[in-house]
Image (cartoon, helix red, strand yellow):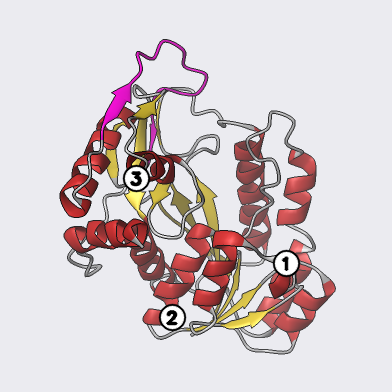
Amino acid sequence: MKILFTGASSFTGYWFVRELARAGHDVVAVYRRTADEYEGVRRQRIDLAASLCTQIWECSFGDDKFLELIATQDWGMLCHHAADVTDYKSPDFDVTAAVENNTRNLGKVLDNLQKSACNRVLLTGSVFEYNEGAGDRPLRAFSPYGLSKGLTAEMFAYHCAIRGMHLGKFVIPNPFGPYEEPRFTAYLMRTWFEKKTAGVNTPAYVRDNIHVSLLARAYSDFAQNLGAESGFSKLNPCGYIETQGAFARRFASEMSQRLGIACELDLAHQTEFMEPRVRINTDMPDHQKLDWDETAAWDEVAEYYRR
């Protein structure tokens, strides 16, 4: 099927495009900027995606170029993975502006899709939204960014329902793997390659860390099985559900045996919990059905950081 995909420059976006293309779909990825404006690991992901999809530059969700693209081609599915993430960790994150950007001209977008006989929409959500996943009650949004993602999902649900479209929501927990931004696991690897002990400041939080390759397989499978009839479907794939301290030890063990380096940890005694102590996804992926090999995934992570 022909898929229009937003957000392909992101960590998970690149992996989702990769798996959709591997499954034989014709993916058209739109990017907000010109190719030259992307740098670092984001540019790496864009270059890797070049052989997997058709890339269209300076085209954002809901703008005139995007609307024209929908109107002039036939589509099997819209995968809206892009989201406004500017200063997403800040308590001053602009929720209103983010929702506006995430849903710009949403009605027109959906109307144009239906004109091309497309009735499938797949939206990416986050376990950090309100009322998502499982964990400490109430299931509040982790942050203003999480609030914006939840409000975006509600907008999509409303507009798809009144048009009789099928909305799928794919909820992401904590992915890790090759080509990610320099966050937790990248920090661990950098510290260990410098022959230092890596500190974990929040080892008591219970989170849901998942190999991005498994997440992408689950995404592609969910997309391919999304119905065209009016309705709503959701998938909350989970990975390693454990404390951050336990995950850090797991990661250290897997990398140490593959890379032959000391992967030492210093787990702090956590006394402050500014975020919910537990937040996880709830749907265990079928590794056999998805043809996913856990050992091979760990090998791929180790080889990426070795390079």
Question: Image check: 106 left or right of 224?
Answer: right
Residue 21, labelled with which disc? 2
Q: How many marks?
A: 3
Residue 37, labelled with which disc? 1
| Residue 225 coordinates in the image, percent (x, y) | 38, 72
Question: Image check: 17 left or right of 263?
Answer: right
Residue 193, labelled with which disc? 3
How far is disc 2 from disc 1 in space, using C-alphas? 25 Å
Mark 2 or 1: the one toward you: 1
Which residues fall within the magenta stretch?
A: 264-281
| Residue 261 coordinates in the image, percent (x, y) | 22, 45
How far is disc 1 from disc 3 in space, using C-alphas? 30 Å
Residue 307, labelled with which disc? none
The dominant secondary structure in magenta is loop
Q: What secondary structure is marked by label 2?
A: helix
Going by the numbered disc 2, the residue's amino acid type is Ala
Residue 177's place in the image compared with 54, above or below, is: above
Going by the numbered disc 3, the residue's amino acid type is Phe
Mark 1 or 3: the one toward you: 3
Residue 286 visible, this angle? no
